[in-house]
Image (cartoon, rainbow, N blue to C red):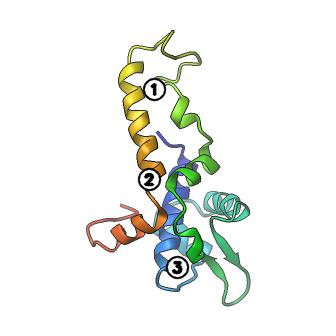
Amino acid sequence: MFSKSCEYGLRAVLFIAQQSDKDIKVSMTTISEEINSPQAFTAKILQKLTKTQIVHSLKGPHGGFSILPEKMDTKLSEIVTILDGDSIYKGCALGLKQCDANSPCPVHFKFVEIRDNLQDMLETTSIKSVVNDLSLESIILKR
């Protein structure tokens, strides 16, 4: 449902937040290795997230990426919107250009419910709440 850049972006934010919670700044190399993402692709995603101030970047020998404490309450929906726009909440499950209640695709009405549940989950889940869940050893960011 998410684009690759959104998947990597969410994983990167969660990894950075997990490290920031321990007061650790992380390098681009470490992030891309930990989330199993190509480094150049990760750099572009983090550039966008830094520009929109979700992620904080500090240059220099003691630099790296972090998430400031006041950004830990950011909802996942904000990150998804930054990286993918709002098409995930409006798009057709089959990728048709025209699909709505007046002209539905074969799975439109079933997908609307899934889409609404996804939007609700993203709008009610903060970075901090996911970081708290990541403390459980069974929860992982890469396979």
In the image shown, does 103 or 141 lie closer to the viewer?
103
Q: Look at the picture and state if 58 lies above or below 108.
A: below
Q: Residue at x 50, y 43 (%)?
A: 2
Quarter-of-image position of residue 112? top left
Q: Position of residue 133 (x, y in %)?
A: 34, 67
Which residue position holds label 2?
Answer: 124
Q: Residue at x 63, y 68 (%)?
A: 55
Q: Look at the picture and state if 25 lies above or below 50.
A: below
Question: Of label 1 and label 3, which has the lower sequence position?
Answer: 3
Q: Residue at x 52, y 66 (%)?
A: 73
Q: Badge 2, how many Cα within 10 Å: few under 14, some, many 20+?
A: few
How far apart are labels 1 and 3 at the CA level?
A: 36 Å
Query: Disc 3 on helix, strand or loop?
Result: helix
Which residue position holds label 3?
Answer: 20
Which residue position holds label 1?
Answer: 93
Q: Are marks 3 and 2 in contact (CB under 8 Å)?
A: no
Q: Badge 3, how many Cα within 10 Å: few under 14, some, many 20+?
A: some
Looking at the image, residue 138 sits to the left or right of residue 60; the answer is left
Question: Of label 2 and label 1, which has the lower sequence position?
Answer: 1
In the image shown, does 51 or 112 lie closer to the viewer?
112
Question: Which amino acid type is marked by label 3?
Answer: Ser
How far apart are labels 2 and 1 at the CA level?
A: 23 Å
Question: Which amino acid type is marked by label 1?
Answer: Ala
Q: Position of residue 66 (x, y in %)?
A: 59, 76
Q: Are marks 2 and 1 in contact (CB under 8 Å)?
A: no
Question: Of label 3 and label 2, which has the lower sequence position?
Answer: 3
Quarter-of-image position of residue 28? bottom right
Looking at the image, residue 139 sits to the left or right of residue 99; the answer is left
